[in-house]
Image (cartoon, rainbow, N blue to C red):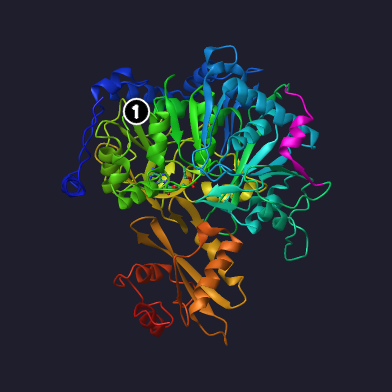
Amino acid sequence: MSNKKPTTSASITSVLHEERVFPPAKAFSQAAHIQSLAQYRKLYDESVKSPDKFWGKRAKEELVWFKPWTQVLQWKEPFAKWFVGGQLNLSHNCLDRHLDTPTANKAALIWEGELATDGKPGEERVLTYKQLHREVCRFANVLKKNGAAKGDRVLIYLPMVPEAAIAMLACARIGAIHSVVFGGFSAQSVADRIHDCGAKLVITADGGFRRGGVVQLKKNVDEALTLKDAQGNALGASIQKVIVLRRAANEVQMQEGRDVWWHEEAKLVGVECAAEKMDSEAPLFILYTSGSTGKPKGIFHTTAGYLLFAKLTSRYVFDLKETDVYWCTADVGWVTGHSYVVYGPLANGATSLMYEGAPNWPEPDRFWRIVEKYGVTVLYTAPTAIRAFMKWGVEWPMKRDLRSLRLLGTVGEPINPEAWIWYHEVIGHGRCPIVDTWWQTETGGILITPLPGATPTKPGSATLPFFGIVPEVVDDTGQTVPRNTGGKLVIRKPWPAMLRGVWGDPQRYNEIYWTEIKGSYFTGDGSRQDEDGYFWIVGRIDDVLNVAGHRIGTAEVESALVSNSKVAEAAVVGRPDDLKGQALVAFVTLKSGVATNPSLREELRRHVAKEIGPVAKPDDIRFAEALPKTRSGKIMRRLLKQIAAGGEIKGDTTTLEDFGVLARLSHGEE
Ligand code: PRX
């Protein structure tokens, strides 16, 4: 294997913007699952011409069924049912099926902790498929013992430890519906989610390590369970039990009758637990995600279609082989962690690596140490992380042996060509293909992506659709626009892993996704297709921001701000940011009599962190006397965006109510 010297940033810059095309290397293609563009096109054509045949064949070959389905797809727009009449179990498909094969004794999960409880970095655990199966069965029994049954909702609020995957798989085993909440969300967010889905149990930990500190997960749960809505009803009223994992040797309060320790409960149950027979369309999980209005909505996915799609995309996009050590750096609190840390890799019998902590703890080479230590072959991470590594300097990756890597992936936000080239040269040594994968919480799995042995790549483009996916770029009337013209990205046909709805609100599901462009799924993203049919995704065109790969609704942050007693009005917009893609800028007017002072900014930032979580803290708060509004009273966000970006104000301002406001804002006056 070559260990070519990384290119310097000067030579990187010089090759940019020539629109380079990177064809797959011959040696890679020859060993890949999909070996040429022609083979991809043939399969793709089959998949869209005869979807029932294509997916039916795969479902039969790839999944273990307790009862076969009778119909591949039942489509009553906007509601899809896949593999109707079939029964299976997801944990059975990820675990039991491997137990009488050589995979049984292969590592299913390799885990590295950020810190050990003795304060030293690099604690590690390996669970083979057999061991993981045993732990999942044991914990499934713990769940049952604590009252969880088929159809119940279970909230998981854990650090990135193997128990997070164990808890998810155990829920799937007994047919409970999990809702994982990212550890960076606040007590209020936990309470809102419990209330929305009516969860019966919470699974949490005494703490998790992040940048050397302890994240107080149990404490947040305790607080969440005391919170009330505006009418005085307890948001956590549905919770009967809290199962607490001992992770951080952190002191926590245990409430008699409600709180139990994972390790103590585990001693009281057996390790035999038959997998429940679940209908293909049984809900599997709910994940809350931000939209352009209101509080985050509970996107839910079901069993068979999701699993099949997660399995196939994992295999083809990451070209998974028996010998791979595959590492997706996402937290299980996001959909990427569901589909590409846990379910997709395990369904394929692959080895999936989990890391608990931050990429720069204790030093900025932590990722590269992990690659070197475990011989990681496939690495899947986010553009924000790549841009941070660029900033920290090439000396960190250069110190480590990265020759085991053979494929690199990115997800979560558009990757700028500079970051793509850096990733390719400095991390991939010019030898590893890059898969820029476009998808969403709602899509369940990757929809637009190169296949690494087949698709020539262009830095910044997610390239072509996966099998069965029919994306198009359209105008406001739903007409497909000509090549190289920008428009709205829609998906024309249903696919197996598409969301089945918004939890408890079928109407909202229809309104958000299926009314913008009649007959198509609206993604909320803008895109164009180039002359080769490649998709270039520009990002959200609704009021959703993508900050460091985290999806944040401007409306959510605004309502968090106005819930502070000092704030009269708030408008939140995005500003381009070199590192995070977008930064959050809040324009705030204060209630009369409240004076601005230097600590108020920090106070409001802390308030947003408390209401939503640290991920939603505004990067910049600007106090204003008034916000620019149209004569009909609508906040002129377009103008605020231009002001936030420090740019010139363009376009029509004739409907603006008060030109004076605009002049003061654009001169930075408060
Ligand atoms: O704007 C797109 C962006 O992330 C959004 C989805 O966010 P979320 O539901 O949190 O899921 C993230 C992980 C799948 C999309 O609407 N996005 C995701 N991947 C890409 C991307 N934008 C450009 N290129 C990508 N590869």
Confirm whether the magenta stretch covers residue 262. Answer: yes
Q: Quadrant of the C terminus?
A: bottom left
Residue 572 vs 317, above or below: the answer is below
Left or right: 546, with 11 as reference point: right
Looking at the picture, how far across and down is residue 444, in whole percent? 52, 37
Q: 71 or 444: nearer the eye?
A: 444
502 vs 253, left or right, is: left
At 77% from the left edge and 42% from the top edge, which residue is drawn? 260
Q: In the rendered image, is residue 656 in sight?
A: yes
Q: Is residue 309 visible?
A: no
Question: Farthest right residue?
Answer: 257
Work out which quarter of the rendered image holds the N terminus and state it.
top left
Name of the residue lying farthest toward the bottom: 593
Magenta part of the chain: 258-271
Q: Is residue 501 magenta?
A: no
- For the residue with label 1, is its CB less than 8 Å from the closest atom of ligand 1? no
| Residue density around tag 1, few if under 14, some if 14–19, many if 20 or more, within 10 Å | some
The secondary structure type at the circle numbered 1 is: loop
The spot of residue 142 in percent (x, y) is 75, 33
Eyeballing the image, is 301 above or below 314?
A: below
**77, 285: nearer the viewer:** 285
Q: Tally the numbered discs.
A: 1
What residue is drawn where x is 43% and y is 71%?
A: 636
Give residue 480's position: percent from left, percent from top: 35, 44
Tell whether 573 sits left or right of 452.
right
Q: Identify which residue is drawn at 75% across, 44% down.
A: 200
559, above or below 440, in the image: below
Q: What residue type is labelled 1?
A: Ser
- Which corner quadrant of the image does residue 556 belong to? bottom right
Q: Mark 1 points at which residue?
A: 404
The image shows residue 422 at horizontal and vertical percentages of 27, 43
Q: Work out whether residue 392 or residue 201 is closer to the camera in this orientation and state it.
A: 392
